Image (cartoon, helix red, strand yellow):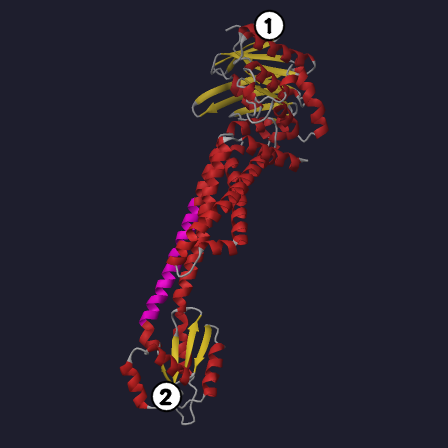
Amino acid sequence: MIYFDKVTKRYGDAIALEDITLSVAPKEFVSIVGHSGAGKTTLLKLLLAEERPSDGSVFFESINVNDLPSSALHHYRRKIGMVFQDFRLIPNKTAYENIAFAMEAIGRTDDEIASDVPYILELVNLGDKARHFPDQLSGGEKQRIAIGRAIINQPDLVVADEPTGNLDPINAYEVVEILKKINELGTTIIITTHNKGIVDAVGKRVVTMDRGKVVRDDAKGKYVL
Amino acid sequence: MVMRRVLGSGAKNFARGGAVSAATVLIMTVTLGIIGSLIFLSALLSYTLTIIKDKVDVTAYFITTAAEGEILGVKEQLEKLPQVRSVSYSSAEENLASFRARHATDQLTLQALDELGGNPLSASLEVRAKDPSEYESIVNFLEASPTLSAGGASIISRVNYWQNKEVIDRLTLAIRATRDIGFAVVTLFAIASILIAFATIRLAIYTARDEIAVMRLMGASNSYIRGPFVVTGVITGVIASILILIIFWPLSWYAGVKTSNWFNGFNVAQYYGRHFVLFFSVLVSSGMVLGAIASIFAIRKYLKV
């Protein structure tokens, strides 16, 4: 489904990623771990076409992401749901509107939005917070809204960049449980994290990065650094 | 559906913008206030220059034996010239009467006039040009194609242009300079105020840069992201223009009496009342266009890949 083919990314003289070759199969749950500066976020940016590789190619399904013109990027990104460490909810939209925006952006009808958004809000246990603005929600609630927004369009892949980084252990656990549930329903999940407890609890494939290189790739891995 | 969503989202963004929306409206109001003031300034300048121009004319005096029909013939020819605004005929009797009225307190002059007997003054044509710089060509026309009397001499005895030429030329220069400087000042202020409005909207959109980045990552097209910001900019412009149109009523009323005394009867309040449609259309359209264009330019930076 995803294939990084000898990918190198340089920022000036600094090498962020060096000769990365990595593939992810459909329905996999992959945890990418590593210290700060290991290249985890850069890897995700290349996958989302926020950045272009200096060398090598990134493939998503049959698409060579490098070759995508700017005008086609938004269509490509609709295949991927994104979850961020800092939630990145739109501050002047309610919880309902934040999730609905993802549907509006791809041109879904009002009827579809009216039926799907309440369902997703219930799925992330926030049915009663639909009219709340982000600054009226706790960190865990914000992240659950962000997950709802990421999955509302039923993407093939959900990418979560440090999704538990700003959460307490209980909320972090809840978020991981939701991601596991989504994965069980057939969506590919890639998360980057520092959280050993979470990686060990998930018990699925772990890719370990260090200084821009993949140093371990374990099918049923543990957090080893 | 997309248009309705964009309009709704833009309106919500404005309503929920709080202090940012209020500050943007305030700055835009000041900007449009400057643009509106420039309309007043242009009108005032134009009114003053017209009054000054009206004070300039040239008079052609005819020989006393010239028949009225011949003089009216010259008048007709002058009126056909494109550079002539008006020509007024004064008969010898009217000139004598006005001379007497002018010198009503000057007994010595009146006594001398009585001693001469009859009417020593001739008929005249007072010519006003559309532009003071065109007097010379009018006078050249009169001198180049003189109407001849029965005796073979020109019926025009004198044109007072050459005595007043220096003053007219200076006045022409002064009017041109004032008009040019006025135009430059108006343009400068208009540009400055537009730049201020641009900077303010740019700042408002800068505060939403993270939000724009998220929208892009969620797969929203550039036009779908841009739309609500443009709508918010237009709403800001419309509200600011309505505010300044309201503010101008008491301001022009207050300034009206003073400007009327200072500028030969130009009353700002009356001008505003008579030209409200002009102010409304210029300010509302400026507000809308400024808001929309400033938003498009400001957001462009954040939509690049």
Image side of residue A79 versus residue A37, left or right: right
- Front position among marks 1 and 2: 2
Q: Chain of mark 1?
A: A
The residue where tag 2 is placed is B119
Residue placed most toward the observer, B49 or A139: B49
B106 to B6, vertically: above or below: below
> Is B261 colored magenta in this rendering?
no
Amino acid at dot 1: Ala
Q: Position of residue A121 (x, y in %)?
A: 66, 18
Q: Say which quadrant the N terminus of chain A sits in.
A: top right
Residue B151 in sight here? yes
- Residue drawn 54% across and 33% down? B303
Residue placed most toward the observer, B171 or B116: B116
- Residue drawn 36% across and 88% down? B119
Q: Which residues are magenta?
A: B166-192
Circle 2 crowding by C-alpha within 10 Å: few under 14, some 14–19, many from 20:
some
Q: Chain of mark 2?
A: B
**Element type at mark 1:** helix
A120 to B49, vertically: above or below: above
Q: Position of residue B61 (x, y in %)?
A: 38, 82
Q: Position of residue B74 (x, y in %)?
A: 46, 83
The residue where tag 1 is placed is A201
